Amino acid sequence: MTSRTVTVTDNTTGKRIEMPVREGTHGPPVVEIKDLYKEFGYFTYDAGFTSTASCRSDITFIDGENGILLYRGYPIEQLAEHSSFLEVSYLLLHGELPTREELDAFNQAVTEHTMINESLKEFFDGFHYDAHPMAMLTGVVASLSAFYHDAINLGDPGNRMLTCHRVLAKMPTIAAAAYKHMMGEPFVYPLNRLYHTENLLNMLFSRPTEPYEINPIHARALDQLLILHADHEQNASAATVRLTSSTGTNPFASIASGCAALWGPAHGGANEAVLNMLHEIGDVSQVPRYLEKAKDKDDPFRLMGFGHRVYKNFDPRAKVMKQSADEVLELLGVENNPTLQVAKELEKQALADPYFTDKKLFPNVDFYSGIILEAMGFPTAMFTPIFAVSRTIGWISQWKEMITDPQLKIGRPRQLYQGVTLRDYTDIETR
Ligand code: SDX
């Protein structure tokens, strides 16, 4: 069978080039353009990578038109309903759902790395009380690279897996430590007898002064939220981790670059921005005024939690999260939560407004997650650190996939130069 190609013709020179097409198991085929410059003298240009595949991957597939999200082929809805975050972490990392023995071994391997070096705790003392927890998280995660020099030995499979276990295990401890520092409360050590998500809740909310009972509603809702945020193909933070890691740098430093990218309000910082927006709107009567602000090109206000680069239909995670928000708030007896009422009215009116539906602006994963976290007692500044605790498994799974790819090359994009052309230096006295 002849291999599929695409022909590009330069209509000024008449020169033609055949470029090979590569097929995926899901999703659109890709045109392999690596020889375009060598044979045709052209770069391609795609600011923001709206239609550029930067890598090949077996981990996560998104169909933006049909609202489909698969982790290693399993639909996110099924995983959110039946699985656990640790089991999903095993799936993303290893490619298959674990047997009971494999899951128990994985749980043990992660649990034994939940502590951070005692001297890392002192790093938090250097931050002021009002430091944003994402600033603390990003800084401390990067500092892990100062403690694990063996992580640079990327050729050793045992070291690679140890690094995966370490960063998955320590992210909750670091996120909780940032929260405790922000609250001025004592740091809480991880307890190995607790399951991953319950350990996170205990490190966040327990205090030496009284017993802390883990609320099973909180534990299940948080575990499901971690499943929904675990990976999302080449989102900005995962792409950042890949580009950083392509230089062979310490993987903890790469994960810190992912934290930095996630923090932005256009990405993982949107969940915090959604709650701030809902609080600013304050009441359902103000929803029409804010929808008009979002439509006004001269107004920088955007509907946070709406729109997505890939989902041009609904975000399947938002659907699950909306149902979970209803259930959790009802179970917690706060179903009349004014923030939830504003969110539902905002969604209802936006989805009835052609401005938003014509631009394919639907609620994304961040629109409802903050409402659940707020109802569970999280301050808005902690929403993105919780997103980072989840996305860590996506980042490190993609790091492992990339670092073991025989075709690994350092990422080095080119550019369209439109600056000043050639000119000579002039002496300062003559300028
Ligand atoms: C996440 O990539 C991922 O997979 C990310 C993520 C993951 O799991 O990793 O899914 C997590 O980051 C979700 C997105 C969270 N961000 C927000 O909720 C912030 C609000 N949304 C927008 O900033 C925006 O929709 C983006 C950043 C999400 C997507 O931006 P795009 O794809 O670059 O789209 P765009 O900015 O070109 O917008 C297209 C049009 C523009 O209008 P025109 O210039 O065509 O007239 O839609 C408008 C925009 O002005 N628009 C919005 C809007 N989002 C886009 N108008 C009002 N409110 C919005 N939220």
Image (cartoon, rainbow, N blue to C red):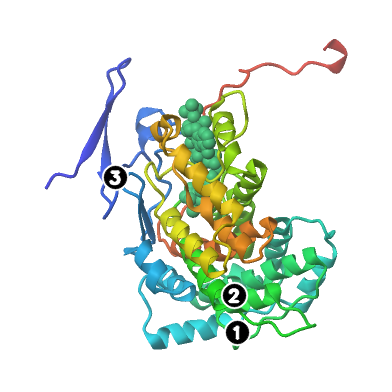
Q: Amino acid at mark 3?
A: Pro
Q: Which residue sits at x=50%, y=48%?
A: 344
Q: Residues within 10 Å of mark 2 (few under 14, many from 20)?
A: many
Q: Is the C-beta separation of discs 3 and 2 under 8 Å?
A: no
Residue 169, numbered label: 2
Q: Which residue sits at x=45%, y=54%?
A: 318
Q: Amino acid at mark 2?
A: Ala
Residue closer to the observer: 129 or 299: 299
Asked if residue 225 can be seen in this view, the reply is yes
Label 2 residue near ligand 1, CB within 8 Å: no
Q: CA distance from mark 3 to mark 2?
A: 36 Å
Above or below, 215 relative to 17? below
Q: Give coordinates of residue 42: x percent, y percent.
A: 41, 28
Residue 112, numbered label: 1
Label 1 residue near ligand 1, CB within 8 Å: no
Residue 28, numbered label: 3
Taking the view exactly as shown, the residue that stands out farthest to the right is: 429
Which of the 4 image quarters holds residue 135? Answer: bottom right
Direction from residue 201 to residue 349 in the image, left or right: left
* Between discs 3 and 1, the one toward the N terminus: 3
Q: Give coordinates of residue 178: x percent, y percent.
A: 73, 65
Element type at marker 2? helix
Q: CA distance from mark 3 to mark 1?
A: 42 Å
Q: CA distance from mark 2 to mark 1?
A: 8 Å
Q: Give coordinates of residue 133: x percent, y percent.
A: 72, 59
